[in-house]
Amino acid sequence: MRRLTAIVMMTVVAFSLSACGRKGRPIPPDGTINRVYPEVQFPKAPGEAETLPEAPESTTR
């Protein structure tokens, strides 16, 4: 009985570890469109925004 339990536990661990490398990059199903999302840039903190130089104002009227 112990041997059977040990084999079952090793099998469970092996199956769970086999998917570790794919968690960040899941395999898309066949026939789906590969999606590419733009890189999102978040606004800076209020204190950091004040140190940036201002853009020159337009002189045209």
Image (cartoon, grey):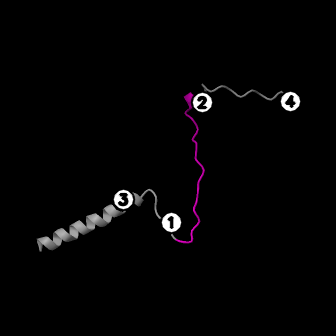
Residue 51 covered by magenta stretch: no
Mark 2–mark 4 Cα distance, whole angstroms, equals 26 Å
Q: Amino acid at mark 4?
A: Thr
Q: Residues within 10 Å of mark 2 (few under 14, many from 20)?
A: few
Magenta extent: 30-49
Q: Do the residues bearing badges 2 and 4 touch, measured as CB atoms within 8 Å? A: no
- Mark positioned earlier in the residue sequence (4 or 1): 1
Q: Which residue type does callout 3 highlight?
A: Cys
Residue 15 drawn at (x, y percent): 31, 66
Q: Residue at x 59, y 65 (%)?
A: 33
**Tag in front: 4 or 1:** 1
Q: Which residue is mark 3?
A: 20
Residue 44 figure quarter: top right
Mark closest to the chain's N terminus, 2 or 4 = 2
Residue of label 1: 28
Sequence-wise first label, 3 or 4: 3
Q: Percent x, y for residue 4? A: 16, 73
Q: Secondary structure at mark 1?
A: loop
Residue corresponding to mark 4: 60
Q: CA distance from mark 2 to mark 3?
A: 40 Å
Question: Gap between marks 4 and 1, in whole Å?
Answer: 52 Å
Of discs 3 and 4, which sits in the foreground? 3
Residue at image x 60%, y 25%?
A: 51
- In the image, is residue 31 part of the stretch drawn in magenta? yes
